[in-house]
Image: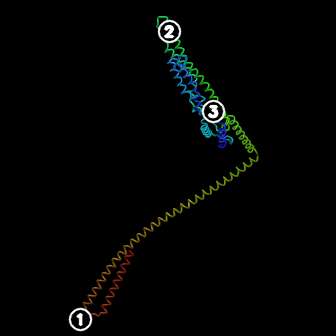
């Protein structure tokens, strides 16, 4: 689609008319109004031999200024502007077509209207409101200027003598004569405007027709859309007909029956497998609950055993404590007994005047030390066991 569009735009560039200077076109449009105004101005200055009143010159000058403003909105100037900005026109046309593309039957074209685009684009070239009133505003202003000029030159006819009255009548006629120059100028400008307006519009229509013919491949026409949709519908009908032919054949129904039967078998197998899975799941859950119950019973038994062990350990601790106390008391009593025995031996030796043998004394001391060491060892083991 882009290649086709680029090729079409290249063809448009080849069809472009030679560009003209729009300033020269504007000068051409104001040439006659300017010459006519200069002609009346020379009559007012007395260079030419006809009389023009000051009020007529002022009113004609006002119409001339309006003509200068309206000249840019004439069809001749508009077509010149259109040809001058042909590149910008091609860019906007490309964007317009790209935004409204619609595929039909594998063909991509714009669903928008070329006429709508060209009407919108033409409104940006000139102001149609000015162009629509220009042909009638110039003669209207001329007639209005004539009445104003007559009103300004109209005498009061207050003279009593015939000579003075004739003089006033001559002034009236001369004022009326110059007043009609304003209407003549307005009608002349209207004819000039209409000529170039129609000429410019005909050129613009011709250029638009050439562009429309060159870009016809980018736009869908009503007939093409109807034909494309009709073709699509015919293809759909053909596909539907082939589908009905397949549906109405015996082979199709046999395959359909076998397929349905196969699917029902698969469905039954799925239900059987699902029932087995549910049964196995229930069994696993039951076994798990039983194992959990046994575990809870064992935990309760372990708690009882643990309490029993703690109780027995407490009793054992109390017994070892009492034993430790008794052993400590016994060791103290044994130490005291040994000490008393040593004193007794010493005293006995001293009374008899004999000194006990050293070997016996040393043997007794060693026995006492051994007894003390064993006693301390027993106490330490009892402390550790506690």
In this view of the protein, which residue sits in the foreground, 294 or 85? 85
Query: What residue sits right under mark 2 in the picture?
Result: 167
In the image, residue 46 sits, relative to residue 73, either above or below, namely above
Q: Which comes before the other along the chain, label 1 or label 2?
A: 2
Where residue 43 appears, as percent x and y from the top left, is: 54, 19
Question: Which element is circle 3 on?
Answer: helix
Q: Quadrant of the C terminus?
A: bottom left
- The crowding category of the residue bearing disc 3, from other C-alpha atoms within 10 Å (few below 14, some 14 to 19, many at least 20), is few
Query: What residue sits right under mark 3 in the picture?
Result: 115
In this view of the protein, which residue sits in the foreground, 352 or 142? 142
Where residue 118 appears, as percent x and y from the top left, is: 61, 33
Where residue 298 appears, as percent x and y from the top left, is: 49, 65
In the image, residue 222 sits, relative to residue 272, either above or below, namely above
Q: Residue at x 28, y 93 (%)?
A: 356
Tell me which corner region of the image, top left, top right, bottom left or bottom right, holds residue 113: top right
Cα–Cα gap, marks 1 and 2: 204 Å
Cα–Cα gap, marks 1 and 3: 161 Å
- The crowding category of the residue bearing disc 1, from other C-alpha atoms within 10 Å (few below 14, some 14 to 19, many at least 20), is few
Cα–Cα gap, marks 3 and 2: 64 Å
Query: What residue sits right under mark 1 in the picture?
Result: 353
């Amino acid at each position: 689609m882009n290649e086709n569009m680029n090729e079409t735009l290249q063809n448009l560039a080849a069809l472009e008319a030679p560009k003209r200077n729009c300033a020269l076109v504007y000068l051409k449009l104001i040439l006659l109004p300017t010459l006519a105004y200069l002609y009346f101005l020379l009559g007012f200055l007395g260079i030419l031999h006809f009389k023009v009143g000051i009020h007529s010159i002022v009113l004609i000058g006002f119409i001339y200024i309006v003509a200068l403003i309206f000249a840019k909105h004439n069809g001749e100037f508009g077509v010149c502007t259109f040809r001058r900005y042909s590149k910008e026109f091609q860019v906007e046309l490309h964007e317009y077509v790209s935004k409204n593309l619609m595929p039909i039957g594998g063909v991509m074209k714009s669903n928008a209207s070329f006429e709508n685009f060209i009407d919108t684009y033409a409104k940006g070239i000139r102001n149609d409101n000015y162009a629509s009133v220009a042909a009638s505003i110039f003669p209207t202003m001329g007639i209005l200027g004539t009445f104003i000029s007559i009103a300004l030159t109209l005498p009061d006819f207050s003279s009593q003598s015939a000579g003075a009255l004739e003089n006033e009548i001559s002034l009236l006629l001369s004022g009326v004569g110059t007043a009609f120059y304003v209407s003549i100028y307005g009608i002349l400008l209207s004819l000039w405007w209409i000529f170039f307006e129609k000429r410019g519009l005909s050129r613009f229509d011709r250029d638009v027709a050439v562009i429309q013919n060159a870009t016809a491949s980018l736009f869908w026409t009503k007939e093409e859309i109807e034909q494309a949709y009709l073709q699509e519908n015919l293809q759909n009908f053909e596909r539907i007909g082939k589908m009905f032919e397949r549906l109405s054949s015996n082979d199709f129904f046999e395959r359909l029956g076998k397929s349905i039967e196969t699917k029902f078998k698969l469905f039954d197998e799925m239900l059987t497998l699902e029932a087995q899975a549910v049964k196995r799941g229930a069994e696993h859950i039951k076994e798990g609950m039983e194992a959990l119950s046994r575990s809870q019973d064992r935990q309760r038994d372990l708690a009882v055993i643990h309490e029993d062990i703690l109780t027995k350990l407490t009793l054992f601790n109390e017994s070892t404590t009492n034993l430790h106390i008794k052993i400590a008391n016994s060791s103290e009593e044994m130490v005291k007994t040994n000490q008393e025995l040593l004193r007794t031996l010493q005293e006995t030796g001293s009374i008899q005047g004999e000194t006990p043998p050293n070997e016996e004394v040393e043997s007794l001391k060693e026995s006492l030390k051994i007894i003390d060491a064993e006693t301390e060892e027993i106490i330490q083991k009892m402390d550790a066991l506690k």
